[in-house]
């Protein structure tokens, strides 16, 4: 399935974040069947709270297309976007968003708040949940399990 292939590429981005000690979240942006940008979390590495996978991928897409309007693009992200990323996705006019795992602590596509579902905004993003949900959830669980184990061994 084509959508699963794009989410697998987002999972590869998440694995890059994992290897850098970052929360393993990855994103890819697709236009006309072709991946035009990729991103993964880099906020620890860059000491920048805005360096979420979605923002990194959006910035690369803007640069590649020479426009902030991504009307004909789809985004695949391994974890439900936070409020900052959901707002950026709306402002960027992304057409469709595919989400792997839900984020019950910070998700802004319905888990905690539904920024993407606000009808009064001038742009609506079509959202699809649960694409490769187990794989997207497992990489996060593994990362945090290892992190807790490292912290407890230092005590």
Image: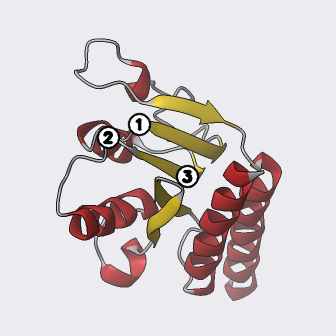
- Between residues 153 and 50, which one lies in front from this camera angle? 50
Label of residue 27 in the image: none
Q: Residues within 10 Å of mark 3 (few under 14, many from 20)?
A: many
Q: Secondary structure at mark 3?
A: strand
Q: Residue at x 70, y 64 (%)?
A: 8
Q: Residues within 10 Å of mark 1 (few under 14, many from 20)?
A: some
* 9 left or right, relative to 27: right
The residue beneath circle 3 is: 76
Res. 84 visible in picture: yes
Task: Find the residue positioned furthest to the top.
Answer: 120
Which of the 4 quarters of the picture holds residue 72?
Answer: top left
- Between residues 20 and 62, which one lies in front from this camera angle? 62
Q: In the rendered image, which quarter contains the C terminus?
A: bottom right
Which of the 4 quarters of the picture holds residue 136?
Answer: bottom right
Label of residue 95 in the image: 1
Q: Residue at x 59, y 81 (%)?
A: 16
Separation of disc 3 and disc 2 at Cα? 15 Å
Q: Residue at x 64, y 40 (%)?
A: 102
- Between residues 46 and 122, which one lies in front from this camera angle? 122
Separation of disc 3 and disc 1 at Cα? 11 Å
The residue beneath circle 2 is: 71
């Amino acid at each position: 399935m084509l959508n699963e292939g794009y989410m697998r590429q987002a999972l590869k981005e998440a694995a890059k974040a994992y290897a850098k000690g970052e929360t393993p979240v990855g994103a890819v942006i697709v236009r006309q069947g072709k991946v035009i940008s990729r991103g993964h979390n880099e906020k620890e590495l860059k000491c920048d709270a805005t360096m979420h996978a979605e923002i990194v991928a959006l910035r690369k897409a803007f640069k590649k297309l020479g426009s902030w309007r991504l009307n004909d693009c789809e985004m695949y992200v391994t974890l439900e976007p936070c409020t900052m990323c959901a707002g950026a996705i709306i402002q960027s006019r992304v057409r469709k968003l595919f989400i792997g795992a839900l984020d019950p602590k910070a998700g802004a596509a319905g888990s905690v708040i539904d920024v993407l579902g606000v009808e009064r905004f001038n742009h609506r993003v079509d959202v699809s949940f649960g694409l490769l949900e187990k794989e997207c959830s497992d990489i996060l669980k593994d990362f945090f399990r290892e992190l807790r184990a490292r912290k407890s061994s230092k005590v």
